[in-house]
Amino acid sequence: MQRFFIYLILFIAAFLLFGWYFSNVTTYLVLSMILAALLRPLTNRLNGFHLLGQHIPRWSAILISYSLIVLLIISLSFLFFPLINNQIIILSNLDFNAIYEQIKTPVAKVEDYLFQYRLLESRSGYLLEQIKISILDTIAQINFGNFLGQVINATSSFFIGLLAVGFITFFLLLENGLLRRNLLNIIPNAYFELSVATFSKVEKLLSNYLSGLLIQMLAIFSLASLGLTIVGVEYALTIGLFAAVANLIPYAGPILGAAFGIIVGISTGDYAQGQELNYFLFKILAVFGVVQITDNIILQPMIFSKSVKAHPLEIFVIIFAGAKIAGILGMIFAIPVYTIFRVSIMEFRKGYKSYKIFKIKSTN
């Protein structure tokens, strides 16, 4: 029995070491498993349809599922095109001389304050001149060759990752249960029953978690879009979609969504300085406040506590541990990975107490 748990610990350690060393491959595999889990019900449904008296081939059902996902992504991306075009027009029409004239007064006040407390001993107008010089130096130091190279590298990495995820997902869907069968094949027969029970429970919890995330995103998108539309913010659907996707990042996501809404609202609206602008900001923050309260009180307890059956304190610690290890991606995947290990350990502990194979081995 002790030998079995030693082997189990060594296997987990080797698995974690492999995942850390080949982080790109691990990321592709995890994303493919998530995408396969989301597309499997649709693929199975399409595969069950009859066309000319025969089932639709599974590879055709997978390609149809891929096509529907691509169409959905393209449709959602159209929400951002008008906003991007609007921001480009705003930037192209900026009058930098007018901006320079507008900042003269506040900079002069800051300069007077520094002179008053002897924190600055230069001539009048020196601070504004330094700001202008620093901006020009920053623009001059931009290396457009390096910038272009970084854009090309980022684009190539994105498409390589996209092809890898698509390729892996295709075979995970084509050979339904391939990964599970291969893992069960390397497990000794004595622990087969326990391993099947563990895999089944992990799959059920992760399926509940992913379904809950989709419900959460849809709810946040609906609430944010409806609320922003009511208070008269332009591009409410775009802001709502961004807030729903950003909310996948625990704790930081709601802040990013609210900040994006404020920036878009201010840049696309014609509001004077003073009470009108303050009231406009208050309306946006009120909408996101209602969305966040709804998320914290109703959605998150339903998704995290019930789907993965973990205490909120566990979730809090695991999320920040994931952030320490892998940043934003670590925060997003912390709960699913923790669920896998947590359920596996609990099931093997339960099996140690209940299954005959452990009792027989312990008496030998």
Image (cartoon, rainbow, N blue to C red):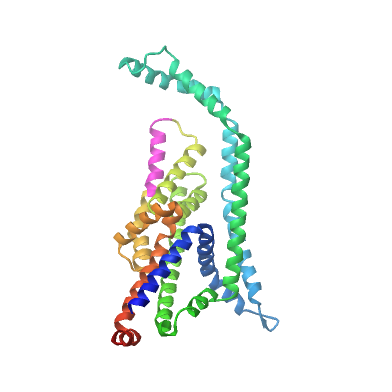
- Answer left or right for 148 relative to 273: right
Left or right: 314, with 21 as reference point: left
Residue at figure coordinates x 62%, y 42% from the top left: 149
> Which residue is painted at 52% across and 49% down in the image?
238
* Residue 206 point in image, percent of width and height: 43, 69
Is 282 or 91 nearer to us in this picture? 91
> Which of the 4 quarters of the picture holds residue 348?
bottom left
> Splitting the image into 4 quarters, where does residue 143 fall?
top right
Is there any visible trace of residue 226 in the rendered image?
A: no
> In this view of the protein, can residue 161 be seen by the observer?
yes
Residue placed at 45% from the left, 70% from the top? 207
Residue situated in front as seen by the camera: 38 or 22: 22
Give the percent coordinates (x, y) of residue 198: 40, 77
Q: Does the magenta stretch include residue 110?
A: no
Most common secondary structure along the magenta stretch = helix
- Residue that appears at 68% across and 83% down: 54
Q: How many marks?
A: 0
- Outermost residue, top direction? 123
- Where 21 falls versus 189 (above or below)? above
Q: Does the magenta stretch include residue 287?
A: yes
In the figure, 104 relative to 80: above or below?
above
Question: At which x and y percent is residue 51?
Answer: 68, 79
Which of the pair 27/16 is nearer the observer? 16
Highlighted magenta segment, given as a residue range? 273-288
The quarter of the image holding the C terminus is bottom left
Q: Position of residue 96 (x, y in %)?
A: 55, 25
Q: Is residue 232 left or right of residue 72?
A: left
- Nearest the viewer among 96 and 83 is 96
